[in-house]
Amino acid sequence: MSTGPGLESLVDQTISVITNDGRNIVGILKGFDQATNVILDESHERVYSTKVEQDATAPISRVELWKAGDKIKTGEYINKEAAELTSKIEGVQQLVLGLYIIRGDNISVVGELDEELDANLDLSKLRAHPLKPVIH
């Protein structure tokens, strides 16, 4: 009989977490509990876009996204204004989060990240549609 979420082998490794609202958060798994609440260190959120802009603006800070949509702080889907800010990004924007806790009921997928393969990706040239929120 299993007593937890089975993440023991991933502790101190880089993982990718897809949340119910479609966010992709990458960081080093430092801990978890029976409810699959996870603690990530050195984490960042990857914001995907399909737009290609020749005249890209300066990188968008997490604070600017908070101003654009106060619900982003609670892990809910960002509002239209914040989405428009992120659409000005070339490639994949990485928003630094640092030490970050994600509630287990907000997690859709946890996966191990191949650090060598990830390091070889050119995120500035990568284009993808943002993930849609999970609807229960």
Image: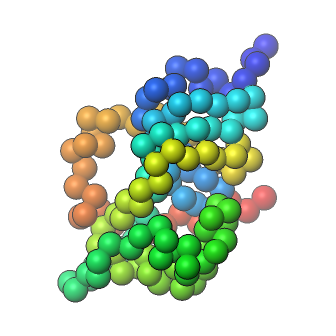
**Front position in the image: 61 or 111:** 61
Q: Is residue 123 visible?
A: yes
Image spot of residue 43 (x, y percent): 45, 47
Q: Compared with residue 86, is residue 40 higher up or lower down, i.e. above or below?
A: above
Image spot of residue 35 (x, y percent): 75, 35
Residue depicted at x 30% and y 67%: 91
Residue depicted at x 66% and y 71%: 71
Residue depicted at x 52% and y 20%: 9
**Front position in the image: 134 or 82:** 82
In the rendered image, the quadrant that contains the C terminus is bottom right
In the rendered image, the quadrant that contains the N terminus is top right
Image spot of residue 36 (x, y percent): 69, 35
Image spot of residue 46 (x, y percent): 42, 58
Name the image quarter holding residue 31. Answer: top right
**Front position in the image: 30 or 76:** 30
Q: Compared with residue 93, is residue 67 higher up or lower down, i.e. above or below?
A: below
Q: How is the image coloured?
A: rainbow
Name the image quarter holding residue 58. Answer: bottom left
Q: Compared with residue 20, is residue 10 higher up or lower down, i.e. above or below?
A: above
Q: Is residue 77 visible?
A: no
Number of marks in the rendered image? 0
**Left or right position of 131 against 85:** right
